Image (cartoon, rainbow, N blue to C red):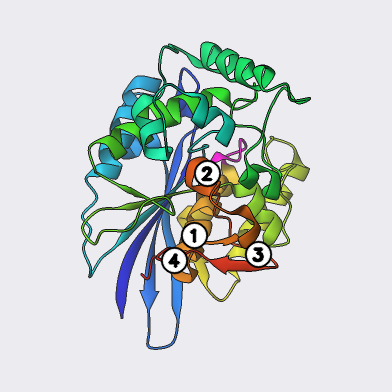
Amino acid sequence: MSAHTIYGVDFSGAARAGDNIYVARGHVLTTSDNETLHIETCTPAPALLDTTADRDAVLSGLREFIATRPTSDANPVAFGCDFPFSLPMMHVTAADGVTDWQSFLQWFPGDMTDPSTFASWAGDVAAAAETEQTYIRRLTDNRVGALSPYHFFIHSQTFYGIRDVLAPLVKTDRVRVRPMQSPASDIPWIVEAYPAATLDRLGLPDDGYKSTTDDARNRRQLIIEAIDTRDEVTLTADAKTTALTDSDGDALDAIVAAVATFHAARDGITVPSSVNGEWQYEGWIVPWHSWQSICEIPNTKMSL
């Protein structure tokens, strides 16, 4: 029996981002005919990373944590992070000198100094295209019901996630972002997770579990027990307690992100054949799901 490591990260771009970032860790236990994810811990980022909750400190710590996880053919490591990894294709190609997703990361954030200027620029690009929508969504957002990456609800997550975590890791070749990049045996993989879509595909409540009410707590309890009783996932008592008592739902989202990452790693990443090449610019969300009319992208299976 061999073990492989999976992390799920629920992200925040708030000034005290560490108050809302949790990191779930699990191991994939492999037998001759099965693989199961055992989620061992779910920890607030400042405690795990030994930082303050201040955004700059915790995001720097998270970036270093991802980059320094020991990984090899015998012990691959995969991360699932809950923030948009890119923008709609029209925005990627509108950036000066950008020809693909990787050069977009090299460019980002251009002259934009904060989430507000980023969202304003994105809105101007949409307006110049004479679309009827203020907030353009990626194809992957449309398929899972996610917001536009520059929507005012999440534009801070997008800005700080790409600028302070993803882009520096890609630029220094410390991660492989799937499915846009091919894997390497000695570098962690990272995928874009969206817990609400994963919960929906699992047939579980994807909202109403983030508050201090009894109903929200009951929903968290239902979700936790449903995940824990599936054949392919188990949780420790500590992980379940953390997810249940965190009324903001961030700990639970981190666990769900880990589940999505496990399935992407075990089963491969698939996209509809109708998407053509847009995913190479826009990225791809990897909830656990089974789409109709899908085809596996060559070399996307992570093969834990």
Q: Residue 242: tell me if it is visible.
A: no
The Cα–Cα distance between marks 3 and 4, rounded to whole angstroms, is 33 Å
Residue position marked by numbered label 2 in the rendering: 251
Badges 2 and 1: C-beta atoms under 8 Å apart? no
The Cα–Cα distance between marks 3 and 2, rounded to whole angstroms, is 16 Å
> What residue range appears in magenta?
246-250
Q: Position of residue 162 (x, y in %)?
A: 42, 31
Decide whether residue 249 is among the magenta residues.
Answer: yes
Considering depth in this image, is 304 or 135 the residue closer to the camera? 135
Badges 3 and 4: C-beta atoms under 8 Å apart? no
Left or right of 78 on screen, residue 141: right
The Cα–Cα distance between marks 2 and 1, rounded to whole angstroms, is 14 Å
Residue position marked by numbered label 1 in the rendering: 237
Left or right of 39 on screen, residue 130: right
Three-letter code for the amino acid on which mark 1 is drawn: Ala
Residue lying at 68% horizontally and 49% vertically, measured from the top left: 144
Three-letter code for the amino acid on which mark 2 is drawn: Ala
